Image (cartoon, helix red, strand yellow):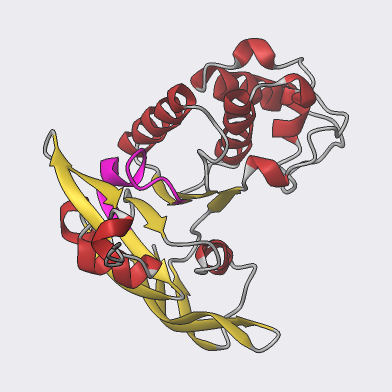
Amino acid sequence: MIRLRDVTCSYDGTPVLEHVDLHVAPGSLTGVVGPSGSGKTSLLRTLLGSMRPVEGAVVRRPDTRVAYVPQVETVSWSFPVTVAECVLMSRTTGRRLPWASKAERVEVADVLDRLDIGELADRHIRALSGGQQQRVFLARALFAKPDLLLLDEPTSGVDVATRHDVLHLLADLNEGGLAILLTTHDLNGMAAHLPQIVCLNRRVIAAGTPQEVLRPDVLEATYGAPMQVLEHGGMPVVVDVPLADVVPLRKTS
């Protein structure tokens, strides 16, 4: 669907991605993990086409439609629109009239119902919970009928119950054939439950299944700090290494 070949990107001459090779396959579900400043958002922008590499190439399958869901913290939730209007605003091409057609209103209702927020259509976006806000921007993305959905930290700032709801919702969308690539800081809540993981710190440190990637050596190379990996229910669980195991304790007299 999209392939990055030896891609390097930079801001003002400072590299944010270096020699990245990445393949996004149709129907895939992939999580990208890494510390703050590791280039995760830049990777999404490169896949989206809004950031051009200074080296390497981005190869995209013809007619591939890509939609993007930003972090909810970056959105101006005071903008005076309803949920339905917010979703409609995502369609900027192929419209002959400045207002929504009857067919488009039916489409909006269908996508909101699909995400279990149909009853919120006429509610102002500022009156939503964090989980509802995330679903609204998922609805905006799905309204564009994408082949690939990119999400930047979709569980940032939400509670555990909402995180599980988002994870199950994305799994359902993926089972329907939608390819999904998301960034996350949540190694245990999200990454350990995704079928494919990419560890990124300006370059790709490792890529594979959680069992293949969530290993102490890979995580230390990614985050620059030692981590332990335990197993619970057949899944890897990442925990910090106790400080006493990292720095020898000073002897006292």
Residue 218 coordinates in the image, percent (x, y): 25, 67
- Percent x, y of residue 230: 16, 46
- In the picture, the quarter occupied by the C terminus is bottom left
Q: Quadrant of residue 1?
A: bottom left
Give the quarter of the image for residue 132: top right
Residue shown at 52%/47% (left/top)? 153
- Taking the image as shown, residue 218 lies to the left or right of residue 133, namely left
Residue at position x 60%, y 42% in the image: 144
The one nearer the camera, 37 or 103, is: 37
Residue 185 at x, y = what percent? 45, 50
Magenta segment includes 193: yes
Tell me how many marks there are: 0
**Is residue 24 at least partly visible in the picture?**
no
User: Residue 72 at what x, y percent from top left?
Assistant: 65, 40
* Residue stretch in magenta: 184-197
Q: Is 72 on the left-hand or right-hand side of 27?
A: right
Residue 109 visible? The answer is yes
**Residue sitting farthest toward the front:** 253
Residue situated in front as seen by the camera: 124 or 212: 212
Q: Residue furthest left?
A: 234
235 in relation to 44, above or below: above
Name the foreground residue: 216 vs 249: 249
| Among the 4 quarters of the image, the one containing residue 223 | bottom left
Q: Nearer the viewer, residue 31 or 137?
A: 31
The residue most toward the top is: 119
Q: Is 177 within the magenta?
A: no
Instruction: Look at the picture and state if 221 lies above or below 228.
Output: below
Taking the spot 40% from the left edge, 57% from the top edge, the residue there is 32
| Residue at 50 percent of width and 27 percent of height | 159
